[in-house]
Image (tube, grey):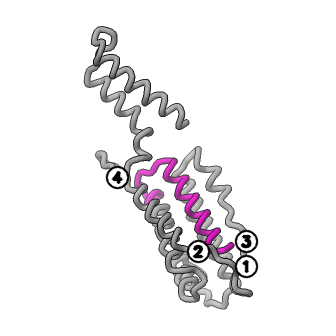
Amino acid sequence: MKFYRWIVFILGAGLIIVGGFFPNVFKINAFTILIFFILAIPTVTPYLKEAIFPGAKFVFKDEIVKTKELMQKSPVKEKMQEGVLHYEPFNLISAREQIESDHILALAVLRIEIEKKLKKEVEFLDISEKERKRLPQIINVLQRREIILPEQISALKKILNMCNKAVHGEVISKSEANQIIDLADELFYRIFS
């Protein structure tokens, strides 16, 4: 799909250049430029930090970069404390399968998988039923007990925040959704491996 987008972009740019040098071969007008602009949007947006169009604002790239930086500060756990957590691999297959058909739904699936994973991990901890019910309480327990490092908590909250924003209507590309899923995968590897 990326290859197709680049071909369309290069072809459009080539036609506009040809139209500039040979105006009798290909006429450039406002309609031609509008079509080229529309075709170029999917090619250019993954490289933008922020773009504002009527009714849409793209800011995920910056959040993704900040989350990556947080995770780089976070070391991979060398050995789990005995009896604290029971590690099971984080399963992102359902989110990854969904990405091509509906990348927003894939982030909703990711959000659900994160919550299920964390709830499963705290089953082995001696905490109240109230602390097990909602994700914010679970995250607080993991932070208080220093099972998850502060940088990892921040990265986790950013990932959840990006998922929530996308699910509630903020515009996000498939590429960005895929990056968010990759970030979650790397984060859970760093936390629980």
Q: Amino acid at mark 3?
A: Glu
| Residue at position x 73%, y 87% in the image | 82
Calculate the distance from the C-alpha at mark 1 to the C-alpha at mark 4: 40 Å
Q: CB of mark 4 within 8 Å of CB of mark 3?
A: no
Which residue matches tag 4?
A: 50
Left or right of residue 120: residue 106:
left
Which mark is first along the chain, 4 or 1? Answer: 4
Calculate the distance from the C-alpha at mark 1 to the C-alpha at mark 3: 7 Å
Which mark is first along the chain, 4 or 2? Answer: 4
Which mark is on residue 88? 3
Q: Main secondary structure of the magenta part?
A: helix
Q: Would you place residue 157 above or below residue 124 in this image?
A: above
Calculate the distance from the C-alpha at mark 1 to the C-alpha at mark 2: 19 Å
In magenta, the rendered stretch is 165-193
Q: Would you place residue 122 above or below residue 51 in this image?
A: below
Which residue matches tag 2?
A: 75
Residue 118 in percent (x, y) is at 62, 75
| Residue at position x 48%, y 70% in the image | 70
Which residue matches tag 1?
A: 86
Q: Nearer the viewer, residue 44 or 18?
A: 18
- Classed neighbour count for the residue bearing mark 3: other residues with Cα under 10 Å, few (<14), some (14–19), many (≥20): few
Q: CB of mark 1 within 8 Å of CB of mark 3?
A: yes
| Residue at position x 70%, y 84% in the image | 124
Which of discs 1 and 2 lies nearer the camera? The answer is 2
